[in-house]
Image: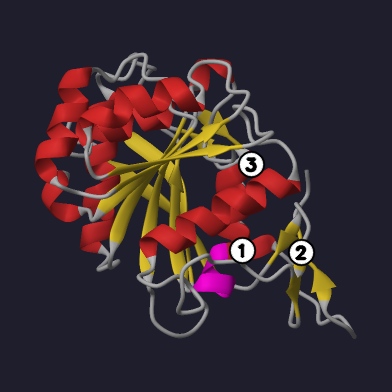
Amino acid sequence: MSFDPASYVFTQPSAPTAIRASTVLPARRENVELRTSDGHRLVGELAVPESGGIKATLITLHPLPTHGGFMDSHLYRKASYRLPALAGIAVLRFNTRGTSSPRGTSGGAFEEGIGERLDVEAAVQFAVDRGLPNRWLVGWSFGTELALMYGAAEPVASEIEGAVLLSPPLHRATDVHLKEWAESGKPLKVLVPEHDDYLQPAAAATRFALVPQAQVLGVDGAKHLWVGEKYAGRVLNEIVDEVIPGGAAGGAGTVLPQEWDGPVATAHA
């Protein structure tokens, strides 16, 4: 049986709650299905603000499924737990073809990033059809390859504002794709861990020099998987700072709250 986000049990603490890895803040959450143009059913979840307008929409592309990546990879899980409440951001997570998670298994089989083009297109079209505004791709590891290869090409390019890349390995994405992004003029924020296993900040700056508008940020002490609340928090702050003009608080250098004074739930590991 797939996980139902409506099963979270919210309670009202007597004092503000420190936001930890398993803290779930209020949002309207629903299981969703995406349909690809080649006939696959992809499973996912959409989390939107409980009230108020949607300031931005994240279409998340997860790490390599053959190495444990899926829609519940921790940065995306935390984004869905926190960002609807803290920043008014909608978060769409889904499993690419052949990928399994507690939500379920998407149809099809892993296609080395080739067939996954249709998965990216299906996710973006879903967001368009739902009327979700200010749409951004957020790719992590393998997900950055999908964002780079397909985000600046139609039919995706005209439906998104830009992309945020986390730990890009630049294995499948080539200079051809980087030049497409350069020509598109769309914003590209690139977060590169100091101790990344595949591409470290100096090399990333050289490769992404092909994209004049790319902002490449090295993150001291971080590793490819962004383990630790310090690094997860930095990633979420940088995402919000990029996708909401002026940042969530109306100025540059977003720092999301680390406490919540309202109902909370706890996610099971």
On the rendered image, what quadrant is the C terminus found in? top right
Q: Position of residue 119 (x, y in %)?
A: 29, 34
For mark 3, what is the residue?
74
Q: Where is residue 23 in the image (x, y as percent from the top left)?
A: 75, 61
- Does the magenta stretch mainly form a helix, a strand or a loop? helix
Residue at image position (45%, 67%) is 89
The disc at residue 82 is 1
Residue 130's place in the image compared with 170, above or below, is below
The residue lying toward the viewer, choosing from 151 and 91, is 151
Q: Are marks 3 and 1 in contact (CB under 8 Å)?
A: no
| Residue with the mark numbered 2 | 19
Residue depicted at 74% across the width and 82% down the height: 262
Amino acid at circle 1: Arg
Name, please, the residue furthest toward the right: 14
Circle on res. 263: none
The secondary structure type at the circle numbered 3 is: helix
**Towards the viewer: 34 or 257:** 257
- Which amino acid type is marked by label 3? His
**Is disc 1 surrounded by few (<14), some (14 to 19) or many (20+) residues within 10 Å?**
many
Q: Residue 50 lies in magenta, yes or no? A: no
- Name which of mark 3 and mark 2 comes first in the sequence: 2
- Magenta segment: 83-87
Is residue 107 at all visible to an observer of this figure?
Answer: no
Residues at marks 2 and 1 touching, judged by CB atoms closer than 8 Å: yes
Mark-to-mark CA distance, 3 and 2: 14 Å
Number of labels in the image equals 3
10 Å neighbourhood of mark 2: few (<14), some, or many (≥20)? some
